[in-house]
Amino acid sequence: MDLFRVLVVDDEKDFLETLVNRLKKRNVDTVGVLSGEAAVDEMKKQLFDVAILDVKMPGGMDGIETLREMKKMQPLCEVILLTGHASVETSIEGMKLGAFDYLLKPVRLEDLLIKLGQAFEKKDSHEQKIRGARIKQLIRFPGRVFDQEREDS
Ligand SMILES: [Mg+2]
């Protein structure tokens, strides 16, 4: 069974295919797309734990626009930005918009795997906190809910 689901977004086809294949070999359920538009379409279909997003992409949606959309659609999905030396400013903007972190291209697979692991950990602890808050909410006001039900009947 695949433990994690990752979306990789990069306009460089060779890089994208290599990365997707390497992650799949490590039992990461990975989907690769070449544009921001395709990433948005993919996020409409399924939930992702982490997205790896190239900042520099030609055409309609650039990396930052894509990041904004992603955070709107799946706020719990952690996003790792891939950036060139010339676009570090964009990465900083991305971090302010809620990206988990960024890596400079060319990326070493080992570095990416470490970052990916950290992003999974963060997502997992975030989800645990949300579950914990829901449980607290449930056990904190059980009486109120029942009183309400009694009044209604
Ligand atoms: Mg690019």
Image: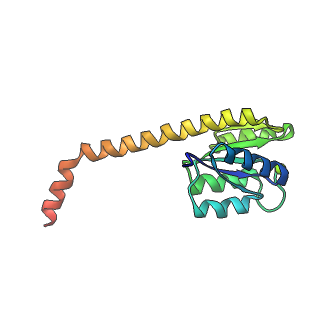
The residue depicted at 16 percent of the width and 65 percent of the height is 152
The residue depicted at 57 percent of the width and 60 percent of the height is 46
Q: Quadrant of residue 13?
A: bottom right
Q: Is residue 12 visible?
A: no
By what rule are the colours in the image chosen? rainbow
* Numbered marks: total: 0
Please state if 106 lies on the left or on the right of 119 as rendered: right
Please state if 56 lies on the left or on the right of 132 as rendered: right
Q: Residue at the right extreme?
A: 86
Q: Nearer the viewer, residue 142 or 127?
A: 127
Q: Quadrant of residue 58?
A: bottom right
Q: Residue at the bottom extreme?
A: 153
Q: Is residue 5 above or below residue 40?
A: above
The residue depicted at 59 percent of the width and 64 percent of the height is 45
Q: Where is residue 65? Give x, y as percent.
A: 71, 55
Please state if 28 lies on the left or on the right of 123 as rendered: right
Please state if 74 lies on the left or on the right of 105 as rendered: left
Q: Where is residue 110? Give x, y as percent.
A: 73, 33
The residue depicted at 62 percent of the width and 43 percent of the height is 98
Q: Where is residue 127? Give x, y as percent.
A: 47, 43
Q: Where is residue 66? Give x, y as percent.
A: 70, 55
Quadrant of the image containing the C terminus:
bottom left
Q: Is residue 153 visible?
A: yes
